Amino acid sequence: MDYHSVTEFLSTVYLLSVLQAQGTTVLIMVLFFLLFLSFVLSGAEVAFFSLTHKDINILRSKQQPPYQRIVDLLEEPKNLLGSLLIANSFINISIIIISNLLIDDLFNFEQFNAVWVEFLIKVLSVSFILVLFGEVMPKVLATQNNIRYAKDFGGIIQIITYLTSGLSKRLVKYSDVIERKLSSSVSGAYSLQELDHAIDITTDNAASENEKNILKGIVKFGNITVKQIMKTRVDVHGVDEEITFIELVNIVRDLHYSRLPVYKEGLDNVVGMIHTKDLLPFLDHPDDFNWRSLLRPTYFVHEQKLIDDLLNEFQAKRIHFAVVVDEFGGTSGIVTLEDILEEIIGDITDEF
């Protein structure tokens, strides 16, 4: 082999080594970028969906683009969640593939002469990276600073949501179909409609329409959620804890309700319940009377709770009133024992 051949061979080897080094550098840079995106997306899932109704109202009132972006993204929570999950899944798969390539470049597993050693090193390394940077760190940070996290990374989330919106909407559509299938109102071999029809044809003419309705109410009782019977937020009358005793008495006289929720700043922050009958012994007290000492604890229930479960809870706790909250912790409305019983026996007139 002459001098020129040796020179060409060494040049080729050097060029290949440079290209390999550059390729490894590019893979490392891509890996760090993907880890950053995984960090952002995992934290965003916690940050956005831990915001309460009160937080969202505060952000809406600020009228600043970063905060409005958060409000806009939460207008369609299912699509937002779908976009975050889809993007994070693709990114995590990419991280696994690139990490596998980098480990092969940086380590020589031939010396171990055992496939299981290579497999164990790769699994532990990639799992550690994904759990630390893609789960623990971002979610802890987002939990402690949810509004700031959503504000700082809202722009990135908006771009990702836009890019994955088509796939996300399809995913949400299919999940809604599956949810409807699973929650279809079928009990045993008979549907609720069939049971209603059976009641109509088996009750004799002597049975009143009210009796038939009671039977139908009993049949449907186990499938009704609190959201279906509650008094919605727009129809709820509450009192601010800052009002005076005379103002409270006047409100009670005007509304004729036996119980009223008491809130601080707004209905999303209910601090207690006032029973109007508790006011009777104090009607002759002066305006500076501390009526807040009469407040009773508030019982909160989720809007998707079944009313038969709620009835059991009312009986166990000996209460008649609950504040209904949505998935964000905001007040959706109120529900009473009368509302539950009316599903079976019809309208009930309150005693106050």
Image: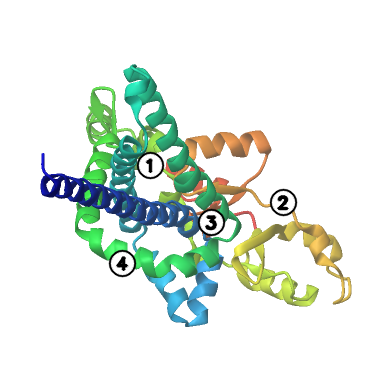
Distance CA(mark 1)–CA(mark 4): 57 Å
Tell me the amino acid under the disc marked 4: Ile
Say which amino acid is labelled 1: Asn
Tell which of 256 and 18 is nearer to you: 18
Q: Residues within 10 Å of mark 3 (few under 14, many from 20)?
A: many
The residue carrying pointer 1 sits among few (fewer than 14), some (14 to 19) or many (20 or more) residues within 10 Å by Cα, namely few
Q: Nearer the viewer, mark 3 or mark 1?
A: 3
N-terminal of the pair, mark 1 or mark 4, is 4
Question: SS at mark 1?
Answer: helix
Vertical side of 9 occupied by 263: above or below: below
Residue labelled with disc 3: 142
CA gap between label 3 and label 2 equals 31 Å
* Vertical position of residue 186 compared to residue 45: above or below: above
Which numbered disc, 3 or 2, marks the residue closer to the eye? 3
What is the spatial separation of the Cα atoms under label 3 and label 4, in whole angstroms? 19 Å
Q: Amino acid at mark 3?
A: Ala
| Mark number, residue 159 | 4
Residue picked out by circle 2: 297
Report which residue position mark 1 lands on. 210
Residue closest to the eye, 37 or 89? 37
Give the residue drawn at x 43%, y 69%.
70
Amino acid on which the number 2 mark rests in the picture? Pro
Tell whether label 4 touches label 2 (CB within 8 Å).
no
Q: Position of residue 116 (x, y in %)?
A: 36, 18
Q: Residue furthest front?
A: 2
